[in-house]
Amino acid sequence: MIPFNLRRLGQLAGIALLGSTLGACVTSRMENVRQEATGIAEGEGVVIMAKSYHLGNETEANFISCIGDSIGRGSTGLRVIPNREFVDALFPWFEPRTAPAETKGLPALMARPGVAETIREKGVRYIIWLDGDTDKVAGGGSMSCAAGPGGGGCFGFAWWQKDANYDATVWDLTGLEDAGTVSADVSGTSFLPAIVIPIPLIARTQAKACKGLADQLKLFIVSDESV
Amino acid sequence: MVFGGTKTPAMALTNGLANASIPTWEPGNLMSRWLKTIFVTILFATLSGCGGSKVMLHDPTIPEPLIDQMPITVVARFPEEFDNFVHEEQVIGKEKWTIDLGQANKLLFTQLFGSMFSDFSVIASDVDARSLPIDALIEPSIDAFEFSVPNQSQTDEFAVWIRYRIKIFDNEGVQIANWPIAAYGKSQTTTFGGDNALRQAAVLAMRDAAALIIMQMDKETGISELSAARARQEEAPPTNLPAEENLQSTAAEEPPDDSL
């Protein structure tokens, strides 16, 4: 019978953790297309919105909150107005059905009663519209696990690839114009080899896309470079 | 054989758990425990498959809309189903989901119409609206309520569809509009968990309906014209309404007569 104790379990967990940190491979590409000069003053902030699911967008809620958290974090963090607070304050003009799809709808929206005043009160300078999602695009391998009175284990090898493609379009509410777009294209392949114990080598594709996109967005907004 | 390693100070924190979960196991005991664990797991999995989930949504609110009120006097009459609306969905081969909206629809429409019209109140079902000094009577109802759970859609999303119907009558009881509206909301399981995701999807569908009503109601039904119509009616000398006019005003609900 296989000797079993907590120390051995700890060693195996350590190996698995090390493997998950080192093993998987991720490639990423960030791009931005600037259309207008940007910049942000004290007291001004941004709000992160997902493009409407009425238009087929499937951006994950956890990705939206990840971008909001990442943009607001750190010494260079921007002021982020919570999405729900913004949408509620401007009800019903930023609901999935009613939110403007293009900047040319902004002048009419700002002319509606109370809209421009509420946006000014909230200190919203930019709306960042997120579009895209993370999908599993390929996978393979096989693994089988068995357990019996004497113990259990898994044997085999599995892998899968996920692609995270996101676009963040920045609208400047001061000039009512499209300031530009930042894109993140991240591909990650995860592996799961198993010889008794499965060792997950997970590619954190979505997390990488979140961090990359948030860092680029911060640079894009605070940069005062002209077009 | 006895399982368990040498105890060290570093393991002190885990000793309680280790002692509890890894006692001196004999192979026979071990097998017996494994079988018990497997049996209990299968039992729970089976029972949860037979059971169902019930989601309650009793006090949804919509934010105060940023709109100008229409200067008309409106009353609403709600159907009985608005007092306690319950919908069940049996996913074939899977669990049953029940959503209990209670009086949520009544609260939604009361708040919504209260924000849209300068003078709004709710009347009981036995009140004759023609005896009231109003411009319009609104009767909302639910034509259909559907939802899908992740098992059905093969995604991690709950989606809710609600089809409301809004009938509008003028102060003489003549129906001037019969407007069906379809609202939709969806929410991801990963964010809110199963029950909360379905509740959130239902709230989003109701907000969607409210947004659509605010945006389109006047365009689709012409309700704001009724105030002017009543003013003209009050200024005009009283006459007996010709029978043809009454027939014409309800003709929109009847198939066109091509016999002429």
Image: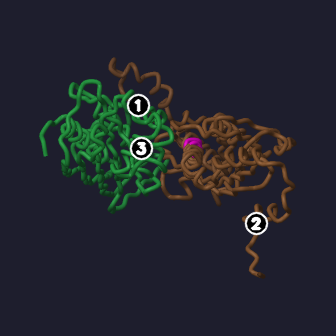
Chain colours: A green, B brown
Residue for badge 3: A109
The residue pinned by badge 2 equals: B251
- The picture places residue B166, in percent across and down from the top left corner, at 69, 52
Q: Which residues are magenta?
A: B199-203
Residues packed near mark 2 inside 10 Å, few (<14), some (14 to 19) or many (20 plus) = some
Q: Nearer the viewer, residue A116 or A85?
A: A116
Residues B205 and B211: in front is B211
Mark 1 residue type: Glu
C-alpha gap between disc 1 and disc 3: 12 Å
Q: Residue furthest front?
A: B237
Circle 1 packing at 10 Å, graded few (<14), some (14-19), many (20+), is few
Q: Which residue is mark 1?
A: A117
Whether residue B181 sits left or right of residue B88 in the image: it is left
* The one of B128 and A200 positioned closer to us in this rendering: B128
| Mark 1 residue element | helix
Disc 2/disc 1 C-alpha distance (Å) = 45 Å
Question: Residues at marks 1 and 3, common chain?
Answer: yes
Callout 3, which amino acid?
Leu
Q: Quadrant of the N terminus of chain A?
A: top left
Q: How many marks?
A: 3
Residue at x-position 52% and y-position 41%: B193
